[in-house]
Image (spheres, rainbow, N blue to C red):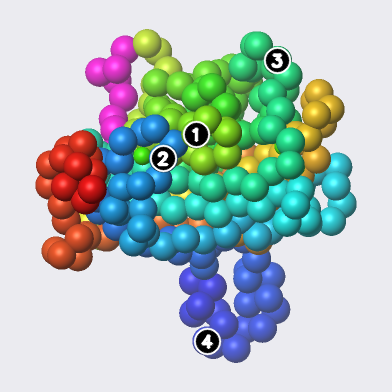
Amino acid sequence: MIRVLCATGMLLLCLSGVAYGADKVYEATEAGTPPVLDGILDEPVWRHAETDTLAFRWDGTVSEPPTAEDLSVTFQAVWNDSTNRLYVAVRVHDDVIADHFDDPLTSYWAEDGVEVFLDPDHSGGDHQYNYNAFAYHVSLFGDGIDLGADRNPVNLKEHVRLGLSADRKTWEIAFALYEVYSHDGNSENDAVMDIEAGDEIGFSIAYNDNDGTPKVRESMVGWVPDGGDSWINADRFGTLRFVAAPATEVIRGSWGEVKSNEQ
Ligand SMILES: [Ca+2]
Ligand SMILES: [Ca+2]
Ligand SMILES: [Ca+2]
Ligand SMILES: [Ca+2]
């Protein structure tokens, strides 16, 4: 719609609609074999996947975008046809890695962590106190915190699997894509997306930087411009498109076999 309005010369509408992540698209290729979630990005698919940067300041007590020494973050994403999972790899340069509270629900937005936004049916719209879309605050311990329908934080860690490197700066995360989530304890009332090449979902990603002061988020950097309200509104998300792997890059078998063959 934005492109149509621009093309017809409706400049004010064009300018007012340019913001947010709607025009950002990441193409995730299919991994013939799912990555091993160990925080080590040595699988062949990570060598080929597009790398993008979290270049936009969304929030934080640091008024300027963080320096490269303070925080710089890149990510990649792939998917697997057999597991129906989205895999996200995140490389973080952060001067201080901090997590202050044993309770994963305490100040979850202001601990060091990756925040991944998913809207599997690409509907957009409000998701603050419902499961229309998700803002998974992935902690260093593999929690997946979002606000629930009762307006309290809820740990949806069954949606998330994390492999973290020993220095806690390389994240390898798998997500199940819940098109329907009931949160009633009965998985028969939920629907996880059956991913196929050509599908598109609402997607965004950010990093929350804590550098040692409890409950203080020094910086939040994200993939799309003006994404600070993404935890409320899925219209702020960009798009992730699932694409098939080039035939030459599809490698079947376990990573143990692949790695041993490469040595
Ligand atoms: Ca790995
Ligand atoms: Ca930092
Ligand atoms: Ca939705
Ligand atoms: Ca930090």
Magenta highlight range: 186-196
The CA distance from mark 1 to mark 3 is 20 Å
Mark 2 secondary-structure assignment = loop
Q: Is mark 2 within 8 Å of ligand 1?
A: yes
The CA distance from mark 2 to mark 4 is 45 Å
Please check the rendered image and state whether residue 112 is part of the magenta-colored stretch, yes or no: no
The residue carrying mark 4 is: 7
Q: Amino acid at mark 1?
A: Ser
The residue carrying mark 2 is: 40
Q: Amino acid at mark 3?
A: Phe
First of labels 1, 3 by sequence position: 3
The CA distance from mark 1 to mark 4 is 47 Å
Q: Residue at the far front: name it.
A: 263
In terms of image quadrants, where is residue 115?
Answer: top right
First of labels 1, 4 by sequence position: 4
Camera-nearest label, 2 or 4: 2
Q: Amino acid at mark 2?
A: Ile
State the residue in front, 180 or 39: 39
Q: Residue 64: percent from the left, percent from the top?
A: 84, 56
The residue carrying mark 1 is: 165
Mark 4 secondary-structure assignment = helix
Q: Residues within 10 Å of mark 3 (few under 14, many from 20)?
A: few
The residue carrying mark 3 is: 101
Q: Amino acid at mark 4?
A: Ala
First of labels 3, 4 by sequence position: 4
* Proximity of marks 2 and 1: CB atoms separated by less than 8 Å: yes
Q: Residues within 10 Å of mark 4 (few under 14, many from 20)?
A: few
Camera-nearest label, 3 or 4: 3
In terms of image quadrants, where is residue 189?
Answer: top left
Which residue lies at the image location 14% right of the left edge and 64% below the top edge? 247
* Proximity of marks 1 and 3: CB atoms separated by less than 8 Å: no
Camera-nearest label, 1 or 4: 1
